Image: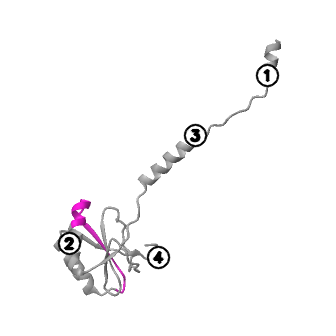
């Protein structure tokens, strides 16, 4: 009996090992980084026209932007109308899709949008859409 009492009388310190917790936090961080879909932008800040029937499907589409003064942006760089076909053809073959969305400012001239649409069709885009924001909603 004496031996048991001596063992109980000694203070034992509890050691908390946080290594598994740190490993778990890093695994969760990596998981969320890999599974997060990042928003693709065209490189130009535009005010989209509004529409009652606007739908969102930008995940598998290639985006091209047109500013209100007719400048064309692709992957956050300004490009010339003559190079739209080349850039889009490469992106469509890499992306495996034939869908392109034009993100144009609501003050963009119609002629500028038509020129870009022509180049997109020549590049092989089957589905060309124009981005709009839903009336009363968020873009």
Q: How many angstroms separate mark 1 from mark 4 (CA)?
A: 71 Å
**Of discs 3 and 4, which sits in the foreground?**
3
Q: Earlier in the sequence, mark 3 or mark 4?
A: 3
**Of discs 2 and 4, which sits in the foreground?**
2
User: Who is closer to the viewer here, 116 or 49?
Assistant: 116
**Of discs 2 and 3, which sits in the foreground?**
3
Q: Residues within 10 Å of mark 3 (few under 14, many from 20)?
A: few
Q: Is residue 98 visible?
A: no
Residue 106: image location, x then y, percent: 37, 83
Q: How many angstroms separate mark 2 from mark 4 (CA)?
A: 37 Å
User: Who is closer to the viewer here, 124 or 18?
Assistant: 18
Q: Report the residue marked by disc 2.
A: 86
Q: What residue is shown at x 61% (from left), y 40% (from top)?
A: 18
Q: Report the residue marked by disc 4.
A: 136
Q: Dot 4: what SS?
A: loop
Q: Earlier in the sequence, mark 2 or mark 3?
A: 3
Q: How many angstroms separate mark 2 from mark 1 (CA)?
A: 80 Å
Residue 46: image location, x then y, percent: 39, 80
Q: How many angstroms separate mark 3 from mark 1 (CA)?
A: 29 Å
| Residue segment shown in magenta | 90-107
Residue 33: image location, x then y, percent: 45, 54
Quadrant of the image occupied by residue 42: bottom left
Q: Report the residue marked by disc 1.
A: 8
Q: Report the residue marked by disc 3.
A: 19
Residue 22: image location, x then y, percent: 56, 44
Q: Earlier in the sequence, mark 1 or mark 4?
A: 1
Quadrant of the image occupied by residue 103: bottom left
Q: Residues within 10 Å of mark 1 (few under 14, many from 20)?
A: few
Is residue 93 part of the magenta span, yes or no? yes
Q: Dot 3: what SS?
A: helix
User: Is 120 displayed left or right of 47 in the figure?
Assistant: left
């Amino acid at each position: 009996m004496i031996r048991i009492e001596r063992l109980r009388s000694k203070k034992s310190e509890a050691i908390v090992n946080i290594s598994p917790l740190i490993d778990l936090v890093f695994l969760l961080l990596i998981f969320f980084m890999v599974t997060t879909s990042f928003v693709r932008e065209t490189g130009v800040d535009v005010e989209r026209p509004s529409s009652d029937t606007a739908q969102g499907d930008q995940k598998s589409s290639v985006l091209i932007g047109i500013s209100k003064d007719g400048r064309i942006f692709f992957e956050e760089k300004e490009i010339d109308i003559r190079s739209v076909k080349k850039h889009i053809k490469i992106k469509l073959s890499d992306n495996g899709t034939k869908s392109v969305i034009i993100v144009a400012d609501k003050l963009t001239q119609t002629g500028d949008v038509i020129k870009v649409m022509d180049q997109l069709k020549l590049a092989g885009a089957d589905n060309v859409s124009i981005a709009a924001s839903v009336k009363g909603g968020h873009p």
